[in-house]
Image: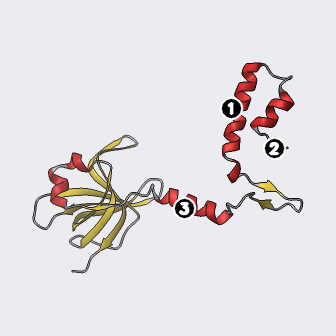
């Protein structure tokens, strides 16, 4: 039997107090609101969804809702970032510049990571970059970096300032 606000009151009113019935009725009303998304079991054991909202429509809705949370990395001038880092704190950014002080290493836990500075060719400054793995580039290469910039990043007992945690580092043609 499916629980609805209507049949809850008629079948259980002698078992619960008035305040408990109000609480149960509110919960059943909330369930009624989600009824189009309810899955039912058929006699042959297959799951079906009543009404005309199909599985594809539900999947499409979830895909649209999920895609809204993906941050879009703004193309940011390295000089702007260096001049006013607070304006970009915790923002997805895309930067271009020259990789210097490249240090490819492995953590004590065995995870590869790379640290380097991304310098602007005009000489207005540099920003620290951290990325997991060992991307294919070296000192002096012109690279494009996508990631999230933080003015202060706490990692275990270490603190890093003005750093991008890169999700993508791509060498650009010279």
Query: Marks 3 and 1: which is nearer the front?
Result: 1
Please provide percent x and percent y for residue 90.
32, 49
Q: CA distance from mark 3 to mark 1?
A: 30 Å
Sort mark 3 into few (<14), some (14-19) or many (20+) by Cα contacts within 10 Å: few
Q: Nearer the viewer, residue 154 or 83?
A: 83
Sort mark 1 into few (<14), some (14-19) or many (20+) by Cα contacts within 10 Å: some
Please provide percent x and percent y for residue 117.
23, 60
Q: Residue at x 35, y 73 (%)?
A: 136
Q: Regarding mark 2 in the picture, which secondary structure is present there?
A: loop
Query: Marks 2 and 3: which is nearer the front?
Result: 2
Circle on res. 26 = 1
Q: CA distance from mark 1 to mark 2?
A: 15 Å
Q: Earlier in the sequence, mark 1 or mark 2?
A: 2
In the image, taking residue 61 as reference, residue 73 lies left or right, namely left
Q: CA distance from mark 2 to mark 3?
A: 29 Å
Residue matched to label 2 = 2
Q: Earlier in the sequence, mark 3 or mark 1?
A: 1
Query: 135 above or below 35?
Result: below
Figure disc tally: 3
Q: Nearer the viewer, residue 71 or 139?
A: 71
Q: Nearer the viewer, residue 67 or 132?
A: 67
Circle on res. 63 = 3
- Locate residue 114: give its quadrant: bottom left
In the image, taking residue 124 as reference, residue 39 lies left or right, namely right
Q: Earlier in the sequence, mark 2 or mark 3?
A: 2
Q: Where the N terminus falls, by quadrant?
A: top right
Its colouring scheme is: secondary structure
Sort mark 2 into few (<14), some (14-19) or many (20+) by Cα contacts within 10 Å: few
């Amino acid at each position: 039997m499916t629980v609805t606000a209507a049949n809850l009151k008629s079948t259980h009113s002698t078992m619960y107090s008035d305040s408990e019935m109000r609480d149960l009725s509110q919960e059943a009303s909330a369930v009624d609101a989600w009824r189009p998304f309810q899955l039912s079991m058929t006699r042959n054991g297959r799951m079906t969804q009543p009404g005309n909202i199909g599985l594809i429509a539900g999947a499409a809705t979830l895909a649209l809702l999920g895609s809204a949370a993906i941050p879009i990395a703004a193309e940011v001038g390295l000089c702007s970032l260096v001049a006013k880092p607070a304006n970009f704190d915790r923002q997805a950014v895309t930067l271009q510049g020259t990789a210097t002080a490249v240090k490819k290493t492995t953590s004590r836990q065995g995870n590869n990571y790379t640290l380097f500075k991304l310098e602007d060719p005009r000489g207005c400054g540099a920003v620290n970059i951290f990325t997991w793995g060992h991307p294919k580039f070296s000192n002096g290469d012109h690279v494009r970096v996508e990631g999230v910039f933080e003015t202060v990043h706490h990692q275990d007992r270490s603190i890093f300032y003005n750093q991008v945690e890169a999700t993508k580092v791509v060498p650009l043609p010279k």
